[in-house]
């Protein structure tokens, strides 16, 4: 006997309710930022809504296999911390520090981890049983800022991230641009002072050798050796072990001229690097981030912007905004969540 | 009375024949390269088929109005030299040295001409009565090489042109990329030696201040002043007036160590600049051109390529070709012909 329209509707509604109750809610994603010292994982409902995070040390000295196990552990703990199970995770995005072949799922070269040609995507998929996508870390920071922080989406954006390493990312026509070898945006090894200080990459005068965290600490130590005075020795002891970017900020705010000079020089070099990038690439907006900017934006941003506009060729910086990101440490996991949810790439 | 189908067909064919006989064959285009010293115009059947050229001096000291009249004269003479009339020209493309707003048809800033905000497109259209499109000169050189010289079209290409000025162009996803302010590819004022020699733009250590023609001549004169010997003084007289890139090649081939050193240094700086650009942009191919490369490719290209690969970050230059263009002086007019025929942009 055929059901009436009313009976049919009731059956459909009951079916729908059963479906919702039984099916796992797998709209969550996990974004991971794999760094040389720490692994940070965040669970996201959408790229603007992180519902929980977990951080553990990387220990790259244990080798790639152990590090990938640590990433897996970090992700599991983050998911459990949100009272979710892995089955409820739609996908996992990971940013790795170095040249990444996203299509092949491989980390081609990551000097800070000592990795060459590591199949991060598939090894992690077999540990976690969920789809994994990988990208270069500062590409993901750029994407995170673009998707979660910028309201009016610019067509072309440049992200510049200053920390232990220096990296960048390019958004062209609203999409992450990675170039022929998936390596576009490797701005840290742009030479801006040929014949200048030695860089970890073997060259001299790279942006990273002038502005990266180690180069700032190195210059401060050299000045102390030359007999200059700084409050940092009182704050941290004579060997300045565990010196952090935040310590530089504290010292400057207490009137430390030595640290102020080192940070101002770094800001000026950053401005020159930005002018180069504006001349070459023509972005609509430049967003700076990373640990050094997170700690020292107030001190550095005015000098960076003034220098960039002074060095940029007339006409190239007109209307171009130069700002610092508010996402801080979360830029990388946010961008990783964006690719995990398949919104871009 | 209605015509039969046969009569109708005959009438149609006669009409078509009359149309072909009367209508001008306006499939030709003119490409113009506007430089600080000369204006070069070429008449093209297609971008690989230049049927005639004309060259006159620019005389920028006469001011923009007179220079635009000289461009008009140069185009008219080129067209007449091919036994064509202006009515047979579908369009005219022009490359100008500086920041160009192609959409508005304006030259925003061209330091070598002393121009700011000149309405080149519309003033030339009113003089010639034909459609005019304008672009940055080295963008057009890049486009010319891409369309007329490269057989397998790469997705991403970088053009680098070394002459009195240094400029570049980016092809992204097969299209000329001009960025937010139409200024992308302004690689000549990329700082690669902060605090280095003074540049015409007011900064120090720009690529152009290290490798541009004037900087090479300046360094040769400085070495002579310091008492070093060169064959150039025999070849050109003690004041080295009218020194050209070709003279440097002749001197090197006669064993002139001073000139060889200056040219080798320039090649090394060019290699560093290329490594920066490969790291940042990730092209599939880098093509070099311009007067310095046209004259000195044999001497410079091996050093440029070796240095670029040494400085490029590991993985970024893999499979990337670094070559010199064969188009020589014709790269600019070829690219101008491409935009005039509406093939790209």
Image (spheres, coloured by chain):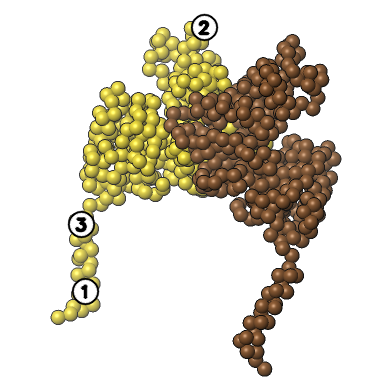
Chain colours: A yellow, B brown
Secondary structure under the numbered disc 2 in the rendered image:
loop
Q: Quadrant of residue A66?
A: top left
Task: Name the foreground residue: B257 vs B184.
Answer: B257
Task: Name the chain letter of the residue that bears numbered label 1.
Answer: A
Q: Badge 1 is on which residue?
A: A8
Q: Quadrant of residue B136?
A: top right
**Where residue B104 sits in the image (x, y, percent)?**
68, 51
Secondary structure under the numbered disc 3 in the rendered image:
helix
In the image, residue A270 sits, relative to residue A235, either above or below, namely below
Q: Earlier in the sequence, mark 2 or mark 3?
A: 3
Residue at (44%, 26%) from the top-left corner? Answer: A165
In the image, residue A116 sits, relative to residue B122, either above or below, namely above
Residue at (20%, 65%) from the top-left corner? Answer: A15
Q: Total of numbered circles in the picture?
A: 3
The answer to whether one can see residue A2 in this image is yes
Secondary structure under the numbered disc 1 in the rendered image:
helix
Task: Name the foreground residue: B318 vs A94.
Answer: B318
Left or right: B312 with respect to B242? Answer: left
Task: Name the chain letter of the residue that bears numbered label 2.
Answer: A
Question: Mark 1 and mark 3: span between their CA atoms?
Answer: 20 Å
Residue at (55%, 18%) from the top-left corner? Answer: A196
Disc number placed over residue A226 in the picture, else none: 2
Q: Residue furthest bottom?
A: B1
Disc number placed over residue A21 in the picture, else none: 3
In the image, residue B129 sits, relative to residue A7, either above or below, namely above
């Amino acid at each position: 006997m055929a059901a009436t329209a009313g009976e049919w509707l009731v059956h459909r509604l009951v079916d729908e309710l059963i479906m919702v109750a039984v099916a796992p809610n797998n709209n969550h994603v996990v974004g991971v930022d794999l760094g040389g010292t720490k692994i940070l994982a965040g669970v996201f409902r959408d790229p603007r809504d992180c519902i929980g995070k977990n951080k553990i040390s990387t220990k790259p000295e244990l080798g790639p296999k152990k590090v990938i196990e640590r990433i897996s552990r970090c992700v599991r703990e983050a998911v459990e911390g949100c009272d979710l199970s892995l089955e409820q995770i739609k996908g996992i995005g990971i940013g790795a520090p170095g040249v990444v072949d996203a299509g092949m799922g491989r980390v081609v070269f990551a000097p800070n981890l000592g990795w060459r040609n590591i199949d991060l995507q598939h090894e992690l998929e077999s540990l976690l049983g969920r789809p994994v996508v990988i990208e270069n870390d500062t590409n993901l920071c750029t994407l995170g800022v673009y998707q979660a922080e910028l309201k009016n989406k610019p067509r072309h954006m440049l992200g510049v991230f200053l920390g232990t390493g220096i990296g960048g990312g390019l958004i062209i026509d609203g999409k992450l641009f990675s170039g022929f070898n998936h390596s576009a945006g490797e701005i840290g090894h742009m030479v801006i002072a040929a014949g200048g200080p030695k860089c970890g990459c073997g060259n001299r005068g790279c942006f990273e050798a002038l502005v990266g965290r180690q180069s700032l600490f190195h210059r401060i130590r050299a000045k102390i050796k030359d007999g200059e005075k700084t409050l940092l020795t009182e704050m941290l002891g004579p060997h300045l072990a565990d010196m952090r970017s935040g310590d530089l900020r504290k010292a400057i705010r207490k009137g430390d001229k030595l640290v102020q000079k080192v940070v101002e020089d770094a800001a000026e070099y950053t401005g020159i690097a930005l002018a180069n990038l504006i001349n070459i690439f023509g972005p609509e907006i430049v967003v700076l981030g990373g640990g050094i900017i997170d700690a020292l934006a107030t001190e550095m941003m005015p000098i960076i912007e003034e220098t960039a506009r002074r060095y940029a060729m007339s006409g190239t910086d007109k209307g171009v905004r130069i700002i610092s990101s508010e996402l801080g440490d979360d830029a990388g996991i946010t961008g990783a969540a964006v690719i995990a949810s398949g919104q871009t790439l």
